[in-house]
Amino acid sequence: MKTKRLAPFALFLLIIFGFIPKAAADDNKKIATFGVAFYNLENLFDTINNNGKYDLEFSPQGSHKWDGKKYWSKIKNLAYAISQMTTKTTPFGPAVIGVSEVENRSVLEDLVKHEFIADRKYEIVHHDSPDARGVDVSLLYNPDLFRVLKVENYPLEIPELPRFRTRDQMCVIGLLGNKQTGYSRVAIIVNHWPSRRGGEQESSWLREAAAALNAKIAAELLEKYPDIGIITMGDMNDDPYNKSVSQVLGAVKNIKDVKEGGFYNPFWEKLDKGIGSYIYRGGWNLFDQIILNSNLVDGKSGLKFLTAEVLNKPFLLQQDGQYKGYPLRTFSSGAWSNGYSDHLPTEIFLVREVTLKDSNEQQ
């Protein structure tokens, strides 16, 4: 009876969880694939001015004339972009999506309820950080593929600048997987490091401080959970080769150079090939990175890195005019362009070997 039930059950897993065969000779071995994405949503504000001068431009009275029509069009566009983050092995999109530049939990509730992605039933982890402009980082997750265990938010404190206020670093510890695939403990740190305002070199020390905090969080996690998979993601406002990412955090370009307890940055090689997620004065940057620790490289966590992508699909890019090929943003030269974001989404894919026999017996 078990042999007769295996084929349809395996087909069910392929459709629902994106399983692919490991080897034709062993029908009981399959590979489950999980997408982990990041998306800077570019000023996802509601229309209510509740933060004084910092929020005024995103209100009907402000310079952007930010009204309900523009807000709901932004929600629709972002929901559509997320709906397109699918592959043959991840037909229901990413298991988790880190996001930045969101004003509050309410705008995320509007986003996940939109008809384009409502069937995924994304749940939200959000925290109001002390950022002066009122934007936060958050996490969206599919509860069928990720279970939250603990959330902790870490403020970036700069002793030299006691009044400095920026986004907290959100650390979400959870279980990636389900009963059919098995679970792996992972920690996802969502970031939006200080901007380059005032100049790249002049402000670099602030991003290096953010990287140092990231490294501290990771070290504490590894001390408590030696096998944990750590994913640090976000808009770093630096490229993979900059000091903050490559030296302070220690994320290396080549996977073969990853040492135990170290980090691998799969987006460094992407940038070397001219692929970016953000463009400034005609030159691509790759600020939107997803970096993983050695436990996700060598499989010690139960999950193993497969590949990484910048989601530069044509609909996310301007198709003509002066800024052809740039991300199609919400506003361009002060005029509403009804776009998506000035950043492109990024995603990594993790795989886990699954034995279907044990899962089949549980049915």
Image (cartoon, rainbow, N blue to C red):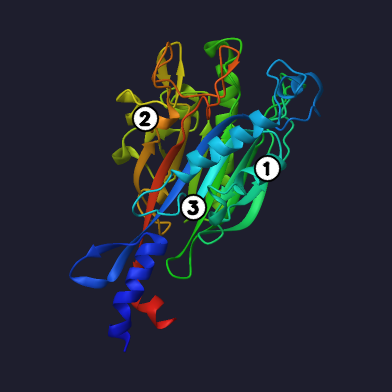
Residue contact at pointers 2 and 3, CB within 8 angstroms: no
The single residue placed furthest to the bottom in the displayed view is 1
Residue bearing the label numbered 2 = 268
Q: Amino acid at mark 3?
A: Ala
Nearer the observer: mark 2 or 3; the answer is 3
Element assignment for label 1: strand
Looking at the picture, tell me which residue is in the foreground, 151 or 227. 151
Disc 3 residue crowd, few under 14, some 14–19, many 20+, Cα 10 Å: many
Q: Quadrant of residue 75?
A: top right
Q: CA distance from mark 1 to mark 2?
A: 27 Å
Q: Residue 136 location in percent, x, y? A: 67, 34
Q: Earlier in the sequence, mark 1 or mark 2?
A: 1
Residue bearing the label numbered 3 = 95
Disc 1 residue crowd, few under 14, some 14–19, many 20+, Cα 10 Å: some
Q: Is residue 138 above or below residue 341?
A: below
Q: Residue 105 location in percent, x, y? A: 70, 42
Residue bearing the label numbered 1 = 153
Query: Which mark is on residue 73?
Result: none
Q: Residue 48 location in percent, x, y? A: 78, 30
Q: CA distance from mark 1 to mark 3?
A: 21 Å
Q: Relative to 55, is 195 on the left or the right?
A: left
Q: Amino acid at mark 2?
A: Trp
Q: Is residue 74 above or below residue 187?
A: above
Q: Quadrant of residue 215?
A: top right
